Amino acid sequence: MKRINKISNVDFFKLVEGKAYYTTDGSKPFWMALYSEDKLLVPDKVCLTQFFPLGDTILFAKWQEPYTYELNLKTGVERVVRDEIVQDVSEQYINYRNSEQKTNSYVNRASGARYVLPYILCEYLPDGGIAENDTEIFRVDWNGNILWSFPFVDLGEDSIHTPREVDRIVKILGVVGGLLWFFTQFGRLVALDVATGKVAYQFSGNPADQDKVEYTQVAGLGDCFFREADSSIVCISYLGFQVFDGTTGDLAESCVFLEEDPDGIGRFDYFYAPNLQGDYFTFLAEMKTDRYGIGRVGIFDLKAHKLLWTEEIIPLEERKATGNHLVTSQPLYMFGDKLYIRDLKHNLHIFQRES
C-alpha cells in the first residue's frame, strides 16, 4: 500500500459506492465544506449535520434548520425538498425526522409511499420494521401497531462484572432466514424469530453465563458483523474470529490467531476496532513497546487466515512530537484498492494498493 493523500481538517467522512465524501472546517465558526475525493460539492458556507449522496444529487441538513436540502451535482442548484430533517438513507427507504412533532417519516424510494411513526426503525421489514427503546426491542407495522416485544431483562444479568444491571443491544446485525440477530453489551449474540419475537439462538463468551443453560458457550465474541454475501455472522476479537451460519446458528468456522498466524496478526499485543470488509477485516493495533498512542493498522485475510498487510502509519516520533495518533472510534475503511482512516488531529489518510 502507498499513501496517496493526506487531507487536513476533516470533520467527518463516509464511503458511498466507492467514493469518499468528507467535510472540512470552514472559514467561520460552524461553517464547513463538502467534498468528494478532491472535488468541492457544497461550498464553505453552512454547517452540515447530515449528508447522503444519491446518484447525481445529495440530500443534506444544515445546523439548526428544520429542513432537508437537495443539491443537484450537475446543475449546482440547491433547494429545500422537505420540512423535515433527513436522518438516514437505505436501499428501500429515506428516513426524515420532525423534531417538533417527534415523529419519523419513512418514504419508500421506489413507490413514494410515506409512513409516519413515533419510532426510529433500525431494521426494515415488508410491513414495517424493528425498533428499540431503553427497555425492549419490538416489531412494529406501518400503522404503528406493536406486533411483539422482547424485554432486555429477559437476557439475564451479568452477576460477575455488572450485577443488577440490565443488558442492552450494542448492534442490530440484520435479518436472515426469518431470524433477527443482535449483539449485546454483555458480550452475547442473540437471534429472535422475527415472526414471533421468541428466542431462537443465544451464544455467549461471557464467563457470567457459563452455568446458564439458555446460553451456548463460545469463545469471546469481540465485535460482531453481518456478512451479506453468505448470510453469516462474523465475530472478531483479539483472540481470533468465529463465523456463525445466520440461518441455522451453527458455528461454521473459527480461527485462533496465535495458533494459525503467530508471526502475523498474532504478534500484536493489543488489537482494536476490527471492521469487516467482505472476506477481510481491517484493524488498529499496538505492540507492548509502542508509546504515545496507536499508530499501526492492518488487514487480515479471513479466507487464508493470514495477515495481509500492516503499517505504522503514524510513526513513534510523530506521535511523541505532535500528540497525534489513531483512535478506536475511527476504524480503517477499505474499498476497492484504497484505504481510508482519520486520526485524532482530523487528518484523513488515503492509501492505494500498488500494482
Image (cartoon, rainbow, N blue to C red):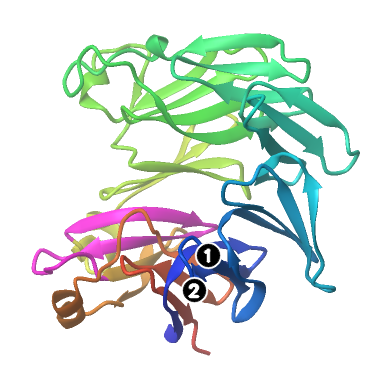
Q: Which mark is residue 31?
A: 1
How far across and down, in percent of the image, does residue 58 sit?
73, 60
| Count of numbered labels shown in the rendering | 2
**Residue 107 in sight from this viewpoint:** yes
Question: How far apart are the two marked residues, 2 and 1, measured between alpha carbons?
Answer: 7 Å
Relative height, residue 103 to residue 9 (above, below): above
Give the quarter of the figure containing the N terminus: bottom left
Viewer-proximal residue, 148 or 330?
Answer: 330
Residue 319 position by quadrant: bottom left
Direction from residue 346 to residue 104 in the image, left or right: right
Question: What amino acid is at disc 2?
Answer: Ser
How far across and down, in percent of the image, does residue 349 sit?
42, 76
How far across and down, in percent of the image, does residue 231 sit?
61, 41
Question: What amino acid is at disc 1?
Answer: Trp
Residue 288 position by quadrant: bottom left
Are dots 2 and 1 in contact, CB under 8 Å? yes
Residue 245 position by quadrant: top right
Q: Confirm whether the magenta stretch covers residue 67.
A: no
* Secondary structure under the numbered disc 1 in the rendered image: loop
Query: Could you tell me which residue is drawn at 57 percent across and 70 percent down?
Result: 33
Query: Could you tell me which residue is drawn at 20 percent across and 21 percent down?
Result: 162
Q: Which residue is mark 2?
A: 27
Query: Could you tell me which residue is drawn at 13 percent across and 69 percent down?
Result: 290
Query: Could you tell me which residue is drawn at 53 percent across and 90 percent down?
Result: 355
Neighbour tally class for label 1: few under 14, some 14-19, many 20 plus, Cα within 10 Å: some
Relative height, residue 344 to residue 205 (above, below): below
Direction from residue 129 to residue 335 in the image, left or right: left
- Magenta residues span 269-295
Q: Which mark is residue 50?
A: none
Neighbour tally class for label 2: few under 14, some 14-19, many 20 plus, Cα within 10 Å: few
* Secondary structure under the numbered disc 2 in the rendered image: loop
Viewer-proximal residue, 341 or 253?
Answer: 341
